[in-house]
Image (spheres, rainbow, N blue to C red):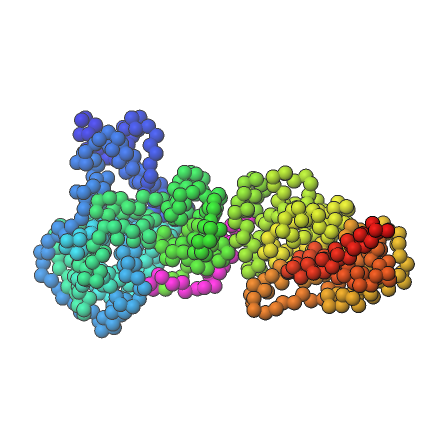
Amino acid sequence: MMLRRAASRLPINQIVNQSSTTVGRLSTLSFINSTTSTSSSSLTSYNNNFYTNNNNVRNYCQKNKVEDEDMPEALSSIQGEDSIIEETEKVVGVADKHSFQTETQKILHIVAESLYTEKEVFIRELISNASDAIEKARHLQLTSQKIMDGDLPFEIKIATDDDKKTLIIQDTGVGMTKEELIKNLGRIGYSGTGDFLKNLGDNPDKASVIGQFGVGFYSCFMVGHTIKVYSRSAAVGSKGYLWESDGAGSYSISEADGVQRGTKIIIHLKPNSYEFAKKATVEAIIKKYSNFVGFPIALNGQAVNTIKALWTLNKSQVTDEEHKEFYQFISKSYDTPNYKIHFATDTPLTIRSIFYIPSQHVEKYGMGRMEPGVSLFSRKVLIQQKAKGLLPDWMRFVRGVVDSEDIPLNVSREHLQDNGLIQRISQVLVKRILKTLDDESKRDPAKFNVFMNEFAGFFKEGLITDFKWKDDISRLLRFESSHEDLEADNKNTSLEEYTKRMKPDQNQIFYITVPSREVALSSPYYEPFKNKGVEVFFLYNTLDDFVFSNIGHFGDKKIVSVESKEAEEFISKDQEKLKDTLSQSEVSDFLKWITDVCGDKVSMAKATTRNTSTPALIVDHESATFRRMMKMMDPSKQHDIPKQQVEFNMNHSIVLKLHAQRQINPAIAKLVAEQIVDNALVTAGLYEDSRTMVPRLNSILDNLLTQSQQHVNK
């Protein structure tokens, strides 16, 4: 009881100091920092102390069952049923009536009816105005100027009344005199905040001020048929006043008693806007638009903005648990992010941002294309949720927040005015994200491989569709390789690692597109590279063929398919030439005969220089992936296989026997030649329907068995 009685008399700091040994190290969830300026240490310290002290006292009181009436005034005023605000002020003077100017009346109609696309943003606008008013009062106090009720805490209170169909928003900010009410509320387009910013000059306090245009207040006429504004200036000795209007053409100002420092706005809602008298509706809007405003917000006596604006803090101040909580709040998910990127810069643009890379994504489950996951803020007020253009579409898996005071907004704050500036910001952000991921890939390769297995499709999409990031993305991609020293359960490697292992005389990066590793290892195209000890990338995804074609070069190394003529030239270089079994004239006759009997599929037949165990190979052929893509794009069209260049291994036993048979049994030789060419097409992935081979194979088998039977009968 002694502590409880003392608590009602002692300042907050003394209570915290006296109770610290009992409470121990408190784990608090403070409201949020009230400044985005890292250079203004005095403001940050002031604000942090305010929130930390309030929360420490609250936690102590809850733990020790301290009653609300014994809690310090600064704390009890923001939380508890007794703190729900109502209209308690009394008009004591005669009302002065004023008319809106004709132009102002027209603009008011536009603001109320056409400026904003969503009615709910009026809450954002009024909270932003309240935040600016408190920021001005705090600036006066911190610059050693006396203000009315100096002990009154800086806070925003909101109350809904479903019975009376009203919504009340109150702040303890700088307030307004009678003259300022006329100037600020009787004239659309005048911004008191604009004058305040001019007076501040380069003061870092500017970063915490939101309003610019002087029209936000009038957004409440979208939802209200009558608006009352009680206000009392922070200047010592000021009186309270009531400003009242129905928005039709005039307003009145009366002196009022019982008005505390700051401004209280009472909105009597229109019938089509009664939903804003419901607590749940208003709470959702606050959390959507104004959750990170720099002062505590209470709705019907309960704190609402309980999540810190982490992007305004120094990265060393933020714990992993706070990052996890913040990520789950903004992404509405329950997993733990793979990576977090906390990035701030003041040149060439002022940007405060936090990005999170999730541990998984839903597109792989066929749940449709994901929406952008990054929200745009200006001075901690939401401008665009799921903002398009901040990051490219292929980065839609990234979750996070971007806050920049350099972003020029239009008067409704809902649309951006300078698309070029957004593109510049996007360039900075994308580069930072890609660089961080590259660093992470080197710091913990195993973790990065797991991440890339999950999200590789997004990066491949980016490489194909967003060419300016080709080099940065290609560094991140991982593909399976033939390199024998890679881990048994993880054969993935990067292009950079591949180039470090290249042979001294090698200037190309080689790859092969196949269905599986087993097919790759048995491929006649890979065989000479294996014999020579040259590493080859194994691509199993049909998209990867396009990816490697789009990369083209990695550094000064060209990316080449093992099925190309260029690969053959490399592999035959310094290769010991085998002794020819046939003479040059016999080889020429054989190749001419192949061209004659298989003229519908062979454009040119020649002897191969590859050291391969297969009779024939197709070289420099059209990508099988490209053919499949064209067929998918237009299934109605017949995409016939064009004639191919076929290389024959003139020392292969099948080729030698075929050369002999074409003189002895031309009919069978023709069937075998056609089958060899079709086998080469199959190996190259170009044969679309192998069922057409069946009649020919049956003929070959029948002839083979007939000859075998005749041999037995002899």
Magenta span has 477? no
Inspect this view and state whether residue 338 appears.
Answer: yes
317 to the left or right of 445: left
Q: Quadrant of residue 243?
A: bottom left
Q: Residue at x 22, y 60 (%)?
A: 273
Residue 665 in picture, x, y percent from top left: 83, 61
Q: Residue at x 80, y 52 (%)?
A: 709
404 to the left or right of 126: right
Residue 570 in picture, x, y percent from top left: 77, 54
Residue 524 in picture, x, y percent from top left: 73, 51
Residue 664 in picture, x, y percent from top left: 86, 61
All told, the count of numbered labels is 0
Q: Residue at x 19, y 33 (%)?
A: 67
Main SS class of the magenta portion in the image: helix
Q: Residue at x 31, y 66 (%)?
A: 115
Inspect this view and state whether residue 227 appears.
Answer: no
657 to the left or right of 117: right
**Image quadrant for the N terminus?**
top left
- Tell me which segment is drawn in magenta: 411-436
192 to the left or right of 423: left
Q: Nearer the viewer, residue 96 or 473?
A: 473
Q: Nearer the viewer, residue 690 or 488?
A: 690
